[in-house]
Amino acid sequence: MTFLRLNNRILSWHHYFLLLSPRNLHGFIDN
């Protein structure tokens, strides 16, 4: 249960970061 909650938290942070700078992430994925 705790692990799932922690994972969800990390995923949320990652999504927030992606929304913050999608261009940088897209470029990184391209390269």
Image (cartoon, grey):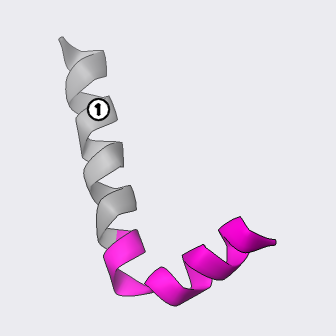
Q: Is residue 15 above or below residue 12?
A: below
Question: Residue extending furthest right?
Answer: 31
Which one is nearer the viewer's eye here, 10 or 30? 30
Left or right, residue 15 beside residue 24 = left
Left or right, residue 21 beside residue 27 = left
Residue 8 drawn at (x, y percent): 24, 37
Which one is nearer the viewer's eye here, 25 or 30? 30
Which one is nearer the viewer's eye here, 17 or 24? 24
Q: Residue at x 29, y 32 (%)?
A: 6
Query: In which quadrant of the rendered view does residue 9 lie?
Result: top left
Query: In which quadrant of the rendered view does residue 13 lie?
Result: bottom left
Left or right, residue 26 beside residue 7 = right
Amino acid type at circle 1 is: Leu
Q: Is residue 17 above or below residue 27?
A: above
Q: Residue under label 1, please give it.
A: 6
Residue 4 drawn at (x, y percent): 25, 21
> Which image quarter is the C terminus in?
bottom right
> Which image quarter is the N terminus in?
top left
Left or right, residue 6 beside residue 23 = left
Q: Is residue 10 above or below residue 22?
A: above
Q: Tell me if mark 1 has few (under 14), some (14-19) or many (20+) residues whose alpha carbon lies within 10 angstroms of its own.
A: few
Please give the range of residues in magenta.
17-31
Q: Main secondary structure of the magenta part?
A: helix
- The number of numbered discs placed on residues in the rendered structure image is 1
Query: In which quadrant of the rendered view does residue 22 lie?
Result: bottom left
Label 1 SS = helix
Q: Residue at x 58, y 76 (%)?
A: 26
Give yes or no for residue 21 being in the magenta stretch. Answer: yes
Residue 10 drawn at (x, y percent): 35, 46
Question: Residue extending furthest top?
Answer: 1
Give yes or no for residue 9 being in the magenta stretch. Answer: no
Q: Residue at x 68, y 66 (%)?
A: 29
